[in-house]
Image (cartoon, rainbow, N blue to C red):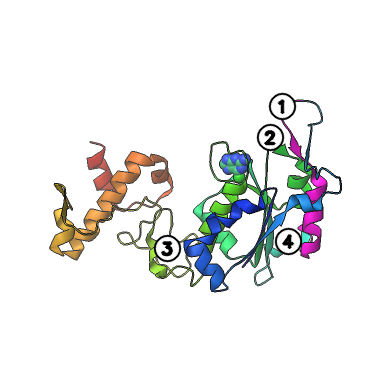
Amino acid sequence: MKADIVTIFPDFFRGPLDYGITRRAAEMGLVKIEVHDLRQFTHDRHRTVDDRPFGGGEGMVLKPEPIFECLEPLGLASREQRLMDRKTPGAATESVILLSAQGERFTQKIAAELAALDRMVLICGRYEGVDERVAEFLADRELSIGDYVLSGGELAAAVVIESVTRLLPGAVGNEASTRQESFTAHGDGATPDAGPDSTCGSGGLLDYPHYTRPAEFRGMAVPEVLINGNHLEIRRWRREQALEKTLRNRPDLLESVELSIDDQEILDRLTGG
Ligand code: 6GU
């Protein structure tokens, strides 16, 4: 996978992508990340990347010309071609993505879609906005990483690259571990080799709690069930804990998850129903 980042803060990315999985994946050649400095595509003495909004209003808007000119030498297929290739099995796939608070919400499902691409270009929005012609005529899609305001798309680009990179085959030591964590819904095409499993994977629920040694620490004990080694009981306990945590922290996730009769029984008990 090739990942291009378009930003006015190229130095920002020296930090977050130089550690852990992303660093290892880059060293292994699984991902090649290139950062493009938007100011290098300006032509005036002040290297202007933004301007005042037509129609008036607060703040500055990123100009379209440097962004379009930055992408031109990348040798991408046309936007029309890219959108067609996305639906053609086996076609080389590229995607140009604008990161902005106005985008579609980025999820694990979209991360899995992006992990199947040959190349993604991430354009980091800035200031109060980006000239809309970028979203309309240059980018294939617009993504946001959540319902809060960031002053730029740089952190979002790092989030997207980290979550996509760890899905590339070979990037994470134990591939089963990426399959069992929170938000990995089975059977949505995100994890083609993982069969549905009501007890082992978290299947769209939040992950169950984890413990390691010591078994007792400052009077805080690890749940007895995990120490006894009864694997059936451990599986049941973890499922129950995952359901409880999801009910408490993310009840919205329960709407779109497939629950077994046992799951429903557990939930009824937890909600006193
Ligand atoms: Cl991608 N950009 C900005 N500016 N704010 C955000 C965001 C992106 N995602 C959530 N908030």
Q: Which residues are magenta?
A: 57-79
Name which of mark 1 and mark 3 comes first in the sequence: 1
Q: The residue under label 2 is which amino acid type?
A: Glu
Q: Nearer the viewer, mark 2 or mark 4?
A: 2
The residue tagged 4 is: 82
Q: State which tag comes first along the sequence, 4 or 1.
A: 1
User: Quick check: is 58 in the magenta stretch?
Assistant: yes
The answer to whether 208 appears left or right of 157 in the picture is: left
Describe the element under mark 4 as helix, strand or loop.
Answer: helix
Q: Is mark 3 within 8 Å of ligand 1?
A: no
Around disc 4, counting alpha carbons within 10 Å, would you say few (fewer than 14), some (14 to 19), or many (20 or more)? some
Tag 3: residue type? Thr
Q: Is residue 232 visible?
A: yes
- Which residue is at 81% across, 52% downward? 41
Cα–Cα span, label 1 and label 2: 8 Å
User: What amino acid is labelled 1 in the image?
Assistant: Glu
User: What is the crowding at mark 3: few (fewer than 14 residues within 10 Å), some, or many (at least 20)?
Assistant: some
Q: Which mark is residue 178?
A: 3
Whole-angstrom CA distance, mark 4 to mark 1, is 35 Å
Q: Ligand 1, what quadrant?
A: top right
Which of the two residues, 75 or 179, is positioned nearer the viewer here? 75
Residue type, numbered disc 4: Arg
Mark 2 burial class by Cα count in 10 Å: few <14, some 14-19, many 20+: some
Mark 2–mark 4 Cα distance, whole angstroms, equals 28 Å
Point out which mark residue 58 bears: 1
The numbered dot on residue 128 is 2
Q: Is the residue 249 above or below the residue 98 in the image?
A: above
Q: Position of residue 260 (x, y in %)?
A: 31, 53
